[in-house]
Every structure is written in C-alpha cells, then in structure tokens.
Amino acid sequence: MKKTLTEKNSKLLLWIGLILFIAGIGVFFYKESILLDSKVNAEKIAQFGDFIGGIVGSLWSLAGVILFYVALTEQRKDIEINRETLKAQLSALNQQIEEFELQRTELAETRKVFEEQSETLKIQRFENTFFQLLTLHHELVDKLNFSKVSMMMNVSMEKREVLSKAFEDLEIKLRHSNSISEKTSTGAINYKVENPNTKEIAIKRLNKAYKEFYFDDYKQILSHYFRNVYHIFKFIYKSQLIKKSKKQFYATLVRAQLSSDELFLILYNSLHQGLGYPNFLFLIKEFDIMQNFDFRIIAKYPYHQEIYDDKINSVKQKF
C-alpha cells in the first residue's frame, strides 16, 4: 500500500489525466470547428465535461489525495526525526550535566586537598619557628651562669642551678621584707616578723623585695630569660598560622619545660609593677601557665595569693 501511494505515482496520474484531457479534446472535437462556428454543439461539450469530470478529474483528485498523503507521511517522518533528535540532544544534555556534576565533585575534592595542604604548610611554618624558639630557650638555660665572690661566700653555678639559686634568693628577699630589725640593750640586732596588715602594704613590700632581688644580682641573668619565655607564649597567641583551638596544645608543650622554680620567678616578675611584662599576666591567664604551680609556696606570704588572684581576674587583653 505504501509503495503505491507515492509522489511518483501521483505525478504519473497527473500525466495520465493530462494525456486523457488532450486526447479527449482530440476525440470529442475532431472535425468540429468550435472557434469558427457560431453554433456550438452543446451535447459534445456536455459529454466532454462529463469525461473530464468523471475520468480526468477523478485521476487528478486521486493524485491530489496521494500527494496530500505523501506530504502527511513526510511530515510524520520529519516529526519522528525531530523527536529522535530531541531525545539525542536531551540524552547528550543529561550526560553533560552528569559530567559537570563529576567535575564539580572533583573540583570540591581538589579544593579540599589544597586546603589541607595549605593548612599543613601553615602548621609546618609555625612549628619551624616554634621549635626554634623552644630550642633557643633550652640553649639560653644551658648558658646561664652565676658567680658571686665575697667575704662571706664564693658561689659559682650554671644552667638550671642558677634558676634554683634565684628562687632561693627571691624567697629570702620576700621573707626579709616582712622582718623588722631591732637593737637589743647589748647592741645586738634581732629580726622579728611583722606581717603587713593591709594588702596595699603587702604590694609595696613585694615590689621592694623583688626590685632588690632583681637589681642586686640577677638583672643581667634573668632579663633575657624572661623576655624569651614571654615572646614564646606571645608568638603562640598572635600567630595566624594555626587555629585557636590548637594554640593551647603548643602552650602546654612550653609549660611542660618550666620547672616549679621557674614558675615562681615568672609569677613574681609578672606581678612587679615596672620590671615585669604587663601583658605576661594576660598570657598566664590565657594559657593557664601556672596550672602546675604549687600555690602553697606563696601562701606563707600574707596577701600574695590574693594579689595574684586580683591581678589575674582583672587582666584584660592588651595585644
């Protein structure tokens, strides 16, 4: 059926109709002079019209139907082709979307890797400086040297023994700050303990005792030591290379290097008004540097624990 209803057959019918039309003219009007005769043979005209309408007209109508069918068929094919093309395009688009999703996932993973690498590099940069400072601290302690020659004594110490000696000498100064000298009737000098009855007096005596201790023998020895310890903790606090949550870990590493004698010296250095580092109290509070310090050591000095607590509680960030 489909092989019959084609454009070629439709054209064939048109040509057949045309041939029949021409042949009909020749047959019906043979020996008729239609143009010259005034009298028209109506019967022949009618027969010719019936012939044209019945045969030629039918052939041409059939040809038109065939052409219309062919056009519809071709249009349907075009629609099917377009539909398949759209399906192919949609499939290609979906594939591109999937590829884009994969690329986005890969980019996210790559970005994550870069961020991790960047974080690792930052930590490495921080740790390089941090451990250099820590090494410098140990070298500084190893190079400490204290010697004193007088009529009463001949002392020579080095390394951590110097810090232990400084601890003992500071304790002596603090005890003497609460001692009052009196002459007896025989001319001898006796010392008696007279504890301060107010916190203000205790602060004055503390500052006086530490100043005497510091300037008598230890300024050249301890100034560099205190400055180095202070800058290690300051470096940890101010560093932008590590997260805040990790700073406490590195501060703990430094804190573990400090002996009880060192913590004692750091505490009184930070409490002194003028000689200590004002911001050191903030760092002591921020990193809980005195966590392992036995505060019973200073409990024997009236108001000293209270003075420390007041300063720690009132300290504000100054960086």
Image: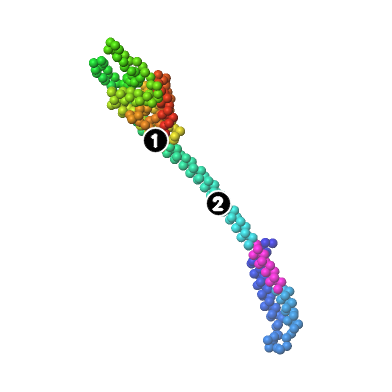
Name the residue located 28 percent from the left edge and 21 percent from the top edge: 146
Residue 80: image quadrant is bottom right
Name the residue located 50 percent from the left edge and 45 percent from the top edge: 103
Q: Magenta stretch?
A: 57-73
SS for tag 2? helix
* Residue 93 marker: 2
Q: Quadrant of the C terminus?
A: top left
Give the main secondary structure, helix, strand or loop, of the magenta stretch: helix
Sequence-wise first label, 1 or 2: 2
* Residue 318 marker: 1
Q: Amino acid at mark 1?
A: Lys
The crowding category of the residue bearing disc 2, from other C-alpha atoms within 10 Å (few below 14, some 14 to 19, many at least 20), is few
Residue 308: image quadrant is top left
**Residue 64 belongs to the span the image colors magenta:** yes
Determine if residue 187 is in view.
yes
Q: Residue furthest top?
A: 186
Alpha carbon distance from label 1 to label 2: 60 Å
